[in-house]
Amino acid sequence: MSLLIVDDSPEMRRAIRLVVADLVAEISECADGSQALTAYAERRPDWVLMDIRMKQMDGLAATRQIKAVFPEARIIIVTVCKGEDMREAARLAGAYAYIMKDNLLELRQILLNGSASSTSQTGENG
C-alpha cells in the first residue's frame, strides 16, 4: 500500500507517518495542495491524507482537482476543522473519509478497512 501525505506542517506529516508506517510500503509527502495533483499523478498512491488549511491551495480545492482527473483516488481529509459544514464540503469535494487530527489512530482503521473494500465511508463517519 502506498500513501501521499499533504500537510503544511512537517511535524504533522511526521506524526501521521509514525501512526501508519507499519501499514504502508511507501510514503510520499508534499507541503501544499498546489503540489498534490502533480504528486498524485507521478506516484498514484493508494491513499491521500489531505489537510484542509494550507497556504497556496487548501485541501478541499486540491481534493476536487485530484478527483476531477483521477476519480478513483481515495482521499482522506485529516484536519482540525470541526463542524458538519466542513464534513459536507469534504464529501462534496470527493473525500473518502474525514477525520480529526486529534484522533489519528482512526486512520489505521480506515486504511485497513478501505484496503479490503472500496466502499465510501464519508457518510458513515459523519
Image (spheres, grey):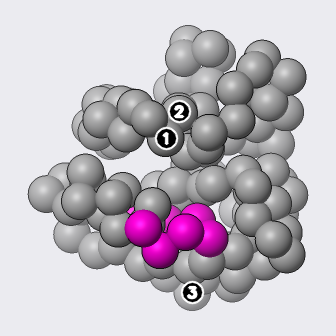
Q: Which residue is mark 2?
A: 99
Q: Is residue 23 left or right of residue 67?
A: left
In the structure shown, which secondary structural element does the residue marked by tag 3 occupy? helix
Q: Which residue is mark 1?
A: 101
Task: Please identify the quarter of the rendering in which residue 36 is found.
Answer: bottom right
Q: Residue at x 85, y 22 (%)?
A: 85
Q: Are marks 3 and 1 in contact (CB under 8 Å)?
A: no
Looking at marks 3 and 2 on the same chain, the residue that comes earlier in the sequence is marked by 3
Residue 79 sits in quarter? top right
Distance (Cα) linking label 3 and label 2: 26 Å
Residue 71 horizontal side relative to residue 60, left or right = left
Mark drawn on residue 67: none
In front of the other: label 3 or label 2? 2
Q: Position of residue 60 (x, y in %)?
A: 80, 51
- Mark whose residue sits in front, 3 or 1: 1
Q: Residue at x 60, y 55 (%)?
A: 50
Q: Is residue 28 magenta?
A: no
Check the image and report above or below for 124 versus 30: above
CA separation, marks 3 and 1? 26 Å
Residue 8 falls inside the magenta stretch: yes
Q: Secondary structure at mark 1?
A: helix
At x 72%, y 51%, the residue is: 52
Q: Amino acid at mark 3?
A: Glu
Which element carries disc 2, helix, strand or loop? strand
Front of the two marks 1 and 2: 1
The reply to whether discs 3 and 2 touch (Cβ–Cβ < 8 Å) is no
Magenta residues?
Answer: 1-11
The reply to whether the C-beta atoms of the residues labelled 1 and 2 are less than 8 Å apart is yes
Total number of numbered discs in the rendering: 3
In the figure, 100 relative to 115: above or below?
above
Residue 70 horizontal side relative to residue 29, left or right = right
- In the picture of the structure, the residue carrying the numbered disc 3 is 42
